[in-house]
Amino acid sequence: MTSERKQLVLRIDPAVHDALARWAGDELRSVNAQIEMVLRRALKDAGRMPEAVAPIPKRGRPANEKGR
């Protein structure tokens, strides 16, 4: 099942972007993935996470089936 991803323009303070970029780098994520993770956490903490929300798509190389 493929869900369509929404795109948006986000204007934020450069210092906030720099902090997000450092945090994302520490967790081996892109800034975009870090923003989505933070937003999802905030929605969950506020009790506003929709039940039908799809999981964050896996990125990167596919898993090696032979365990090499």
Image (cartoon, rainbow, N blue to C red):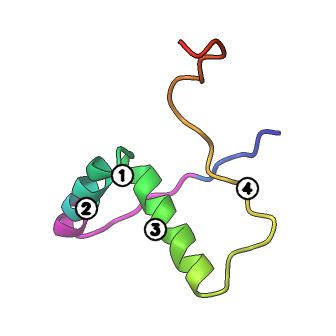
Q: Amino acid at mark 3?
A: Val
Q: Observer-nearest residue: 55 or 65?
A: 65
Q: CA distance from mark 3 to mark 1?
A: 10 Å
Q: Position of residue 6 (x, y in %)?
A: 62, 53
* In-image side of 29 versus 16 (left or right): right
Q: Earlier in the sequence, mark 4 or mark 2?
A: 2
The region drawn magenta spans 7-17
Q: Quickly name the residue at label 4.
A: 54
Q: Amino acid at mark 1?
A: Val
Q: Earlier in the sequence, mark 4 or mark 1?
A: 1
Q: Quickly name the residue at label 2.
A: 17
Q: Position of residue 36 (x, y in %)?
A: 50, 60
Q: Quickly name the residue at label 3.
A: 38
Q: Earlier in the sequence, mark 1 or mark 2?
A: 2
Neighbour class for label 1 at 10 Å: few (<14), some, many (≥20)? some
Question: On residue 31, which mark appears?
Answer: 1
Q: Residue at x 28, y 61 (%)?
A: 20
Q: Residue 2 falls in which quadrant of the image? A: top right
Q: Is residue 48 above or below residue 28?
A: below
Q: Observer-nearest residue: 66 or 49?
A: 66
Q: Are marks 1 and 2 in contact (CB under 8 Å)?
A: yes
Q: Amino acid at mark 2?
A: His
Q: Amino acid at mark 4?
A: Ala
Q: CA distance from mark 4 to mark 2?
A: 26 Å
Q: Residue at x 67, y 83 (%)?
A: 48
Q: Secondary structure at mark 3?
A: helix
Q: Position of residue 58 (x, y in %)?
A: 59, 39
Q: CA distance from mark 2 to mark 3?
A: 13 Å
